[in-house]
Structures are given as structure tokens and as C-alpha cells.
Amino acid sequence: MRVSARIALLSLILFSLGTSSAFAQVDIPPLSVKTELPLYDQGDTVVFKGHVKNLDANNMIDLTVRVVGPLVNGTSSNILQVKQITPQLNGDYEGFFIVSGPLWKTKGDYRILVNYGPQKADTTFFFNGGTGASVIDTPPPPPPPKCGPGEVLQNNVCVPFTQPPPQCGTGTVYDPVSKTCVVAQPVQCPPGQILSGGICVDEPPKPIDKPVVCGPGTVPNEQGICVPAPKADDKGGCLIATAAFGSELAPQVQILREVRDNVLLSTHSGTGFMSAFNAVYYSFSPTVADWERDSPVFKELVKTAITPMLSTLSILNYVDIDSEGQMLGYGIGIILLNIGMYFVVPAVVIIKVRGLLQKRRL
């Protein structure tokens, strides 16, 4: 074997690693063609391969392959080889020709042109030039076997060809009888099962709500919190404040109701306090409310007296109470604040006034 042929064989081994993926691309054009090597010497066998993407198996036609060159300014009208190749059912095709003979003399670029109906593809290789002699150093590879109808060539062996089912869109399934995509029938699950991921699975058990057990004198509300049980004469209103400010919709009455429902009754300690407070409060509040409605002067006195207490209680609407300890802390603080306002401050004022009066007498 000549030196050039040995170089070509070495090039075939080296470039085969880099070009093996060229024939296994996933994103292929409608018609493609590639040569195994980019460069050939006189007597070498040029093997080319390609793929027809949209092959019509019911109307098979051959591919027309032409070899032209050498290229001058990228074009040439000199036809060196013409072949007709029948593609396989999966769209693959393969062919070869030998660069030897009187037409193969000039060194330069040569082009392989492939036509499949209106589709076209081409590839270019370089020829090192030659003497024009018909020299064949290596025998050409044997032609691939001819496969029968319904067969495809895989690894140089004819195997049955199975057309993969088409990819159906959302809401459709492949029907093997009509070999088309049809509308999927809705899945009806039997009782006790639900549809999950397109299949029927057992319905998860529903959680069992445990009844809320409250202590004596309390009942659960809609949120499951124990609140004081309503009494026969307890309408749930602030009787003294309602009579003082004239309506249950007054802002001062709303403040008392929000503190009671949203703050005190949200904790066990607040609930216990309200139970004890209601037992005392509703024993005298109806009578005081009647006095207010009968005497406008007494009504104004009560309104003036409870206004400082309403201001201190409104503080509870602006703090976050998340535990029993916080409830006790804020509650004791509010109680001490009211004791200071209603008892300590007046007592200090009285003592100061008495002291001033005694100094004047002296």
C-alpha cells in the first residue's frame, strides 16, 4: 500500500472518533449528507451517508447523487459521478465511490449533491490530486444487503420495521385500530376512589374531628374555643356602656366587645376571668343601665367615669398575645393601671389638697 493510502487509513481512524456523532444527530434537517473523511487521496473510497427525514413509505423514490468538481469559486459544472440510491424505510441511506480514473486528476474541493424530490443537500471534501490512473489499493466495501418489504437495515442486518406511534396531544390517545389520535374518554372512578395522575386511587381517609371538651360553665364556639356559657338574662352585651353611649354600635362599645371576643376569650386565663367577671357584672349592670336611662345626669357621670377605663382596655387590641403568660402580664398591667387612675391618683390628690388646706389654716 502506498504512503498516501496509509496516511488516509490513519486519518480514517483518527477522524472516525470525531465524526461518529455526525450521523447520530437528533435535530436533523429534512435531507442530509456527510462524508466519513474531509480529505481523500487517489484510489481511496469515499463513503457518504445521510438521512431523509420525511420519507413517504407508500411512494418510495430513489435519491439522485452527483459528484462535481473541482470547484472554482465554489461552483462546478463538471459531473464526475451519478448514482441512484434507494433509502431504507427509516430514512437512512449510504453509498460510496472511488476517486480514481482519468476524471480524478486535479487537486481541490469537490462536492456531493443529493436530490430527493424537491429536497436538496450537499457536502464538500478535498481531493489531493492524482495521475488519472485507475488505481484501487483496497477493495470497495460490500454493498449493503437488500431488505424486503417491511424490513429495515440495522447493523448490516435486515430486521422487521415497526412504525412508532405518533405523539398525541393533550386530551388525546393513540388508537391502534385506526392508527390515529382520538379524543381520550374521561376516566370514571368507582365510589371510594379519586382520579390522580390519570389513574384511580383509593380516596384518603377523612380526618375525624374530635369534639372539644370544655369545663363547667363554658361551651365551645365556632372556632373550637371554650367561652363562658350564655345565661338566661345574658344577651352578651355591655349593658352599662351601651346605656351610657346610647347604642351597641357606638365605637366605645365596639372596643369592649373586640377586647372580650378577640383577646380575653382566646386564652384559658382570659376565659376564666370573663366567667368570674360576668357572674359579678350581670348581677348589678341591668340596674345601673336602668338608672342611666332614667337620669341623663347620672348617664353623663357614668360615661365620664368609664372613659379612662376604655382607653386602657383598647391597648389590648394593639398587642400580640400568643401565650397564657402574656395574657396574665398584660391583664395584670391593665388592672394596676386602672387602680392607679381610679384610686391611687384621687387619693394622692386628696392628700395634697388636705395638706394645702391645713397649711392655710396655720
Image (cartoon, grey):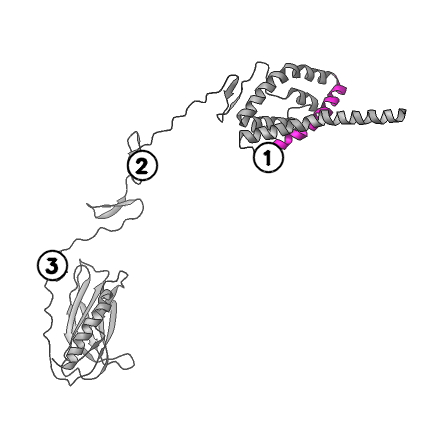
Q: Amino acid at mark 3?
A: Cys
Q: Which residues are magenta?
A: 295-319
Comparing 182 with 241, the one in front is 241
Residue 131 image point, x, y percent: 15, 86
Where is 315 relative to 22, above or below? Answer: above
Q: Are marks 3 and 2 in contact (CB under 8 Å)?
A: no
Of helix, strand and loop, which one carries label 1? loop
For badge 2, the amino acid type reads Leu
Give x and y (percent) for residue 139. Answer: 9, 74
Identify the residue shown where x is 50% and y is 20%.
219
Prevailing secondary structure of the magenta residues: helix
| Label 3 or label 2, whichever comes before in sequence order | 3
Taking the spot 63% from the left edge, 32% from the top edge, the residue there is 315
**Which of the labelled discs sits on residue 107, or is there none?**
none
Is 61 part of what is drawn in magenta?
no
Where does label 1 land, which residue? 319
Query: How far apart, in angstroms, are the residues tagged by discs 3 and 2?
Result: 45 Å
Quadrant of the image occupied by residue 92: bottom left
Q: How many marks?
A: 3
The answer to which quarter of the image holds residue 137 is bottom left
State the CA–CA distance, disc 1 to disc 2: 47 Å
Question: Mark on residue 158?
Answer: 3
Nearest-to-viewer mark from 1 and 3? 1
Question: Which residue position is annotated with label 2?
Answer: 195
Quarter containing the C terminus: top right
Callout 1 environment at 10 Å: few (<14), some (14 to 19), or many (20+)?
Answer: few
